[in-house]
Amino acid sequence: MIFTHRKKTMKGKGSSKSSTSSPNNNKDTGKSGRGIGASAPSNGVVYPSRPSLSNSGEFYDIAFKVMLVGDSGVGKTCLLVRFKDGAFLAGSFISTVGIDFRNKVLNIDALKVKLQIWDTAGQERFRSVTHAYYRDAHALLLLYDVTNKASFDNIKAWLTEIHEYAQQDVVLMLLGNKADATHERVVKREEGEKLAKEFAVPFMETSAKSGLNVELAFTAVARELKHRSLKEPDEPTFQLEDYVNKEMKSAGCCRT
Ligand SMILES: Nc1nc2c(ncn2[C@@H]2O[C@H](COP(=O)(O)OP(=O)(O)OP(=O)(O)O)[C@@H](O)[C@H]2O)c(=O)[nH]1
Ligand SMILES: [Mg+2]
């Protein structure tokens, strides 16, 4: 596929906390009302067709929506901030209200892939807000906290919810976050691996604090999405799980 023009991504932070917000009317919409760009085919993947006069920002070739989900306190916001800004939000825990998004453009095989990453509120009372966003998500990063058994036990319920509200072909990855917290750990890595195997989803442990595997988690998802949407019919499919395992091995298990 040839891209003759590149589109600019909106800079900064999006927010959808008010009741007027919906998955399809955030400010980065362009004219399509699909959420992330100018021309959206039925699968919602955005292939920009003309130069943009939008706010200053980076150019991109293709855009996808990624959602972070999981119990309150597992580290979704911290993971996003680590990925976007390379920083860790230490100090008191400020629970997300409603839903926020941040954009990041990644270079994947000479293509600029924009991820619009939606950070959802894990608290039960915001669940109905989150449900409305699943439908448009191309990928979901489902997090639990390795220091919180309940967050791990709730993964099955999250998977049921994902099954109910997300697209059938959504790219899904399970992340055991806070891997840096060795002393507080109550969920073994093997338990995470077992659960992931049971549900046939790729898995890795991450740390928003140390940066462990944060870049890899988002990059792997971006690669899978890019590959899926630009794949020629006779091309072999991208194996997300193999890619993740290979990358983790080549980095000696874990990387920042
Ligand atoms: N040790 C450690 N602490 C972390 C990590 N990630 C997040 N935390 C801490 O965990 C708490 C919750 O993090 P958040 O990112 O706000 O959690 P959340 O999943 O966004 O929570 P909600 O917005 O309520 O859904 C904060 O106090 C963070 O500092 C991590 O990788 N390691
Ligand atoms: Mg949060």
Image (spheres, helix red, strand yellow):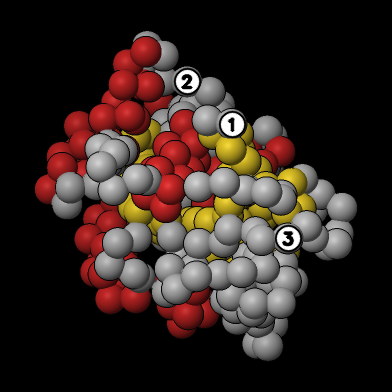
**Which of labels 3 and 2 is toward the front?**
3
Quadrant of the rendered image containing residue 185:
top left
**Which of labels 1 and 3 is toward the front?**
3
Which is nearer the eye, 239 or 229? Answer: 229
Q: Is residue 6 visible?
A: yes
Q: Is residue 43 left or right of residue 49?
A: left
x%, y% of residue 54?
A: 83, 62
Quadrant of the rendered image containing residue 112:
top right
Q: Earlier in the sequence, mark 1 or mark 2?
A: 1
Q: Are marks 1 and 3 in contact (CB under 8 Å)?
A: no
Query: Distance of mark 3 from mark 2, alpha carbons?
Result: 37 Å
**Which residue corresponds to the image point at 58% horizontal and 38% vertical from the top-left?**
111
- Please, what is the three-letter code of the amino acid marked with disc 2? Arg
Q: Earlier in the sequence, mark 3 or mark 2?
A: 3
Q: Is residue 242 left or right of residue 42?
A: left
**Which residue corresponds to the image point at 28% horizontal and 76% vertical from the top-left?**
164
- Please, what is the three-letter code of the amino acid marked with disc 1? Ala
x%, y% of residue 119?
A: 57, 59
x%, y% of residue 175?
A: 37, 43
**Which residue corresponds to the image point at 42% horizontal and 52% vertical from the top-left?**
229
Q: Residue furthest bottom?
A: 20
Q: Which residue is disc 1 drawn over? A: 110
Q: Is residue 215 visible?
A: no
Query: Distance of mark 1 from mark 2, alpha carbons?
Result: 23 Å
Decide: few, some or many residues near mark 3? Use Cα within 10 Å; few <14, some 14-19, many ≥20: few
Q: Which residue is disc 2 drawn over? A: 255
* CB at disc 2 and ligand 1 closer than 8 Å: no
Q: Which residue is disc 3 drawn over? A: 50
